[in-house]
C-alpha cells in the first residue's frame, strides 16, 4: 500500500502556527518580490481570489475582503517542511519527498494494519508536533493514493482527513468521481488528446485498451493507466544526482549598472558551486542568463545568454564566479533595465572520478579552502563567509515588504513569551 500525505494550504498554515490571529481569516502568500499570489487559505479561495493574481491589480480587492497579504517566508517554510518529513519517517522507512508540502509513503509488510487508523495517527502526530493540518490518502498504488488524498481533502467532514481505497468498489467509485484534468500526471496536452476519445474522468481513461494507449502515447501514460487500475507500476523515486544545477532570480528592482548585476551573478554562481559540492559533482560548462523586464513593453528589451566551456571540471566557487562574472560583463548592454539573471552549471561529472587534463588542472588550494568555507557556513548558517564582490548583508535581494519573522531559523526572531 502507498500513502500520499499532503499539508493543507502549507504556506498559509506555517504562518498560522506562529500567528494564531490568522486562523479562520483569509490569507494570501505572494511570490518572490511580492509579485503575485502563489498560495492562499481556504477562506481566500472561497472569496475567489485567483491563483497567480498580480497583487498590484488585486490589492484593492484584498483590502475590501480583509485578506491578509504576506511575503513568502522560505526559511520558515523549508524548516517546517523538514520537520513534517522527519515525522513521516517514523511511520515507515520508505518515504519519497515529492514536494515541499507532500510526500509518498510505501508500506511494506503492513498487511495487518488498519490504514484508516494509521492515517489518523500520522495526521494527529504532525498536527500536535508542528501545528500543520494534513490529509492522508491510502491506496494500492501511487496514482490511486493521489486520488484518495483528493477525496480526503474535498470531503473533510466525511473522511476526517483520511481516505483509504482498499476495495474494487471504492476504486471504481473514486475514478468515476475524479475529472481527467485533476488526475496526477495528466497535463493539458494529454487531456485534449484524450478528450477526442470522449474521456472525461479517470475511469474513462482506464477503459481504453492497453494496446491503444501504448500505440498513441508513451510508456509513462501506460504506467499511469495501470496504476489507476490498481496494478502498481510507479515506484518510489530514488534520490538522483542532478544533470544540471541552476540558480535564477528576479532582482528586487531593475538594474542598469554592471556593478549590481555582477554582484547578483556572483551570488548565483556561489549558490551553484555549493550545490555542486553537496552532491559531489563538478561542471564542465557554465551558462549565464540576463534578461530585461518583459512586462515593460515600452522599454528596450534584451534577453541574452553566454556559454562558457571549461578545460577542466570544477566545483570551486572562485573559478565558477570568475567565469560567470566575465560572461555577464561581455553580454551586458548599456541603458537596458535588467530584471532577471541566472547561472546554470552543466556537463556534470563526479568530482572524484573524472577524466583529467594533462595540461590544465584546478588550483590544488581551492579544494581545502572550499571545504573550510562550507563547514563554517553550515555551522553558523546565514553565509558568514562570502566572496569580496558579494553583498555582505543579504544573499537573496527580494522585495519582501510583508515578511513575517523567521520563527524557527533565526534566534533573533523567535517568539517571545511575556
Image (tube, rainbow, N blue to C red):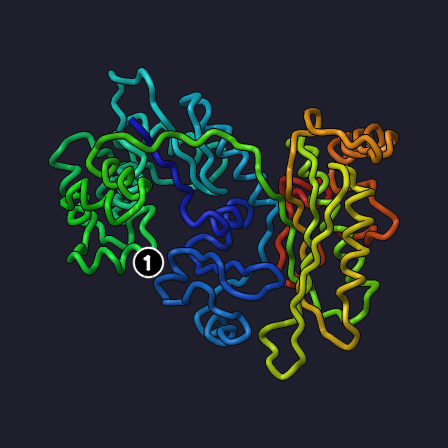
Q: Is residue 304 left or right of residue 87?
A: right
Q: Position of residue 47 (x, y in %)?
A: 37, 67
**Furthest-front residue in view?**
358
Residue at image location 77% in from the left, 30% down from the top: 375
- State whether residue 160 appears in this view: no
Residue at image location 43% in from the left, 63% down from the top: 51
Residue at which label 1 appears: 189
Q: Position of residue 324 (x, y in %)?
A: 77, 52
**Furthest-left residue in view?**
169
Report the number of numbered marks.
1
Q: Position of residue 359 (x, y in %)?
A: 84, 34
Q: Quadrant of the C terminus?
A: top right
Q: Position of residue 129 (x, y in %)?
A: 49, 32
- Foreground: 245 or 304? 304
- Up the image or down, 151 lies above or below 52; here it is above
Quarter of the image where one finds residue 31: bottom right
Q: Quadrant of the N terminus?
A: top left
Residue at image location 65% in from the left, 61% down from the top: 250
| CA neighbours of label 1 inside 10 A, class few (<14), some (14 to 19), many (20+) | few
> Tag 1's secondary structure?
helix
Q: Is residue 415 left or right of residue 47?
A: right
**Furthest-bottom residue in view?**
298
Residue at image location 75% in from the left, 65% down from the top: 331
Quarter of the image where one finds residue 315: top right
- State whether residue 130 appears in this view: yes
- Foreground: 219 or 123? 219
Q: Is residue 14 left or right of residue 377?
A: left
Amino acid at each position: 500500500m502507498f500513502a500520499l500525505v499532503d499539508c493543507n494550504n502549507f504556506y498559509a498554515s506555517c504562518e498560522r502556527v506562529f500567528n494564531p490571529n490568522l486562523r479562520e481569516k483569509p490569507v494570501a502568500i505572494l511570490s518572490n518580490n511580492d509579485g503575485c499570489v502563489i498560495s492562499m487559505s481556504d477562506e481566500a479561495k472561497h472569496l475567489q481570489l485567483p491563483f497567480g493574481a498580480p497583487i498590484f491589480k488585486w490589492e484593492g480587492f484584498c483590502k475590501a475582503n480583509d485578506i491578509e497579504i504576506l511575503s513568502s517566508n522560505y526559511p520558515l517554510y523549508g524548516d517546517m517542511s523538514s520537520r513534517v518529513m522527519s515525522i513521516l519517517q517514523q511511520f515507515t522507512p520508505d518515504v519519497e519527498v515529492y514536494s515541499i508540502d507532500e510526500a509518498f509513503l510505501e508500506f511494506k509488510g503492513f498487511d495487518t494494519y488498519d490504514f484508516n487508523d494509521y492515517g489518523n495517527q500520522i495526521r494527529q502526530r504532525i498536527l500536535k508536533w508542528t501545528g500543520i493540518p494534513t490529509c492522508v490518502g491510502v491506496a494500492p498504488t501511487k496514482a490511486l493514493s493521489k486520488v484518495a488524498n483528493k477525496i480526503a481533502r474535498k470531503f473533510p467532514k466525511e473522511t476526517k482527513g483520511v481516505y483509504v481505497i482498499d476495495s474494487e468498489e471504492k476504486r471504481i467509485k473514486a475514478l468515476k468521481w475524479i475529472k481527467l484534468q485533476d488526475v496526477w500526471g495528466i497535463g493539458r496536452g494529454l487531456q485534449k488528446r484524450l478528450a477526442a476519445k470522449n474521456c472525461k474522468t479517470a475511469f474513462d481513461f482506464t477503459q481504453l485498451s492497453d494496446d491503444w494507449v501504448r500505440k498513441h502515447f508513451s510508456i509513462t501514460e501506460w504506467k499511469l493507466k495501470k496504476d489507476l487500475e490498481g496494478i502498481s507500476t510507479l515506484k518510489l523515486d530514488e534520490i538522483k544526482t542532478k544533470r544540471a544545477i541552476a540558480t535564477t532570480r528576479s532582482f528586487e528592482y531593475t538594474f542598469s549598472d554592471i556593478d549590481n548585476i555582477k554582484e547578483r551573478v556572483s551570488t548565483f554562481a556561489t549558490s551553484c558551486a555549493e550545490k555542486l559540492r553537496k552532491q559531489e559533482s563538478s561542471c564542465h560548462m557554465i551558462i549565464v542568463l540576463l534578461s530585461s523586464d518583459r512586462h515593460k513593453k515600452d522599454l528596450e528589451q534584451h534577453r541574452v545568454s553566454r556559454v562558457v566551456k571549461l578545460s577542466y571540471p570544477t566545483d570551486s566557487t572562485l573559478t565558477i564566479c570568475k567565469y560567470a562574472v566575465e560572461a555577464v560583463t561581455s553580454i551586458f548592454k548599456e541603458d537596458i533595465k535588467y530584471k532577471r539573471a541566472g547561472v546554470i552549471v552543466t556537463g556534470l561529472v563526479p568530482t572524484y572520478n573524472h577524466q583529467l587534463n594533462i595540461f590544465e588542472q584546478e588550483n590544488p588550494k581551492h579544494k581545502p579552502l572550499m571545504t573550510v568555507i562550507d563547514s563554517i557556513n553550515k555551522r553558523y548558517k546565514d553565509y558568514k563567509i562570502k566572496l569580496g564582490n558579494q553583498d555582505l548583508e543579504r544573499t537573496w535581494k527580494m522585495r519582501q515588504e510583508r515578511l513575517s519573522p523567521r520563527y524557527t531559523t533565526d534566534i533573533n526572531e523567535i517568539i517571545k513569551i511575556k
